[in-house]
Image: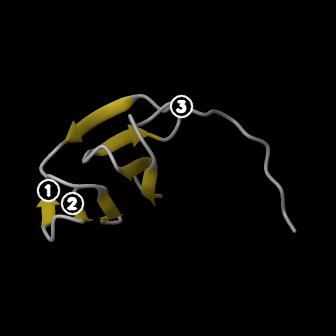
Amino acid sequence: TMHRQLVKKENAHDDSIWSVAWTQKTNLIVTAGVDEKVKIWNAEDLKLRSEFAEHSLAVTSVSASGDGKTVAASSMDGLISVRD
């Protein structure tokens, strides 16, 4: 089993995080939370790059394109959102 050292952690959402995606090419982390928000972070320093709150219930899943330009999210409100 390979164990890696914790490099950095951040209080990312106001409540639980349900999904995380990472784009290797652009080194971005995308998070989805119970707080109804999707946030995009720089993976190097965990600085918030952008966030959006288009859902009315918890965001349960998030995915990002390999180039980090498109983010898709699904929520308990029954909606899917796609952002470029």
- Under circle 1, the secondary element is strand
**Chain-order first, disc 1 or disc 2:** 2
The residue indicated by pointer 3 is 10
Q: Which mark is residue 41?
A: none
Task: Relative to 64, say whether 36 is above or below.
Answer: above
- Neighbourhood count class around disc 2 (C-alpha, 10 Å): few under 14, some 14–19, many 20 upward: few
Q: Is residue 82 left or right of residue 8?
A: left
Query: Residue 1: where, in percent of width, then height?
Result: 87, 68
Q: Amino acid at mark 3?
A: Glu
Asked whether the beta carbons under mark 2 and mark 3 sit within 8 Å of each other, the answer is no
- Neighbourhood count class around disc 3 (C-alpha, 10 Å): few under 14, some 14–19, many 20 upward: few
**Chain-order first, disc 2 or disc 3:** 3
Which residue lies at the image location 83% right of the left edge and 56% below the top edge? 3
Q: Nearer the viewer, residue 79 or 7?
A: 79
- Under circle 2, the secondary element is loop
Query: Residue 11: where, in percent of width, then height?
Result: 50, 31
Asked whether the beta carbons under mark 1 and mark 2 sit within 8 Å of each other, the answer is yes
Which residue lies at the image location 60% right of the left edge and 34% below the top edge? 9
Q: Amino acid at mark 1?
A: Arg
Q: Amino acid at mark 2?
A: Thr
User: To which quarter of the image does residue 12 belong?
Assistant: top left
Q: What's the CA distance linking mark 2 and mark 3?
A: 23 Å
The residue indicated by pointer 1 is 83
**Chain-order first, disc 3 or disc 1:** 3
- Under circle 3, the secondary element is loop
Residue furthest to the right: 1
Which residue lies at the image location 39% right of the left edge and 39% below the top edge? 41
Query: Residue 15: where, in percent of width, then height?
Result: 41, 40
User: To which quarter of the image does residue 82 belong?
Assistant: bottom left
The residue indicated by pointer 2 is 70
User: To which quarter of the image does residue 20 belong?
Assistant: bottom left
Q: Is residue 56 left or right of residue 1?
A: left
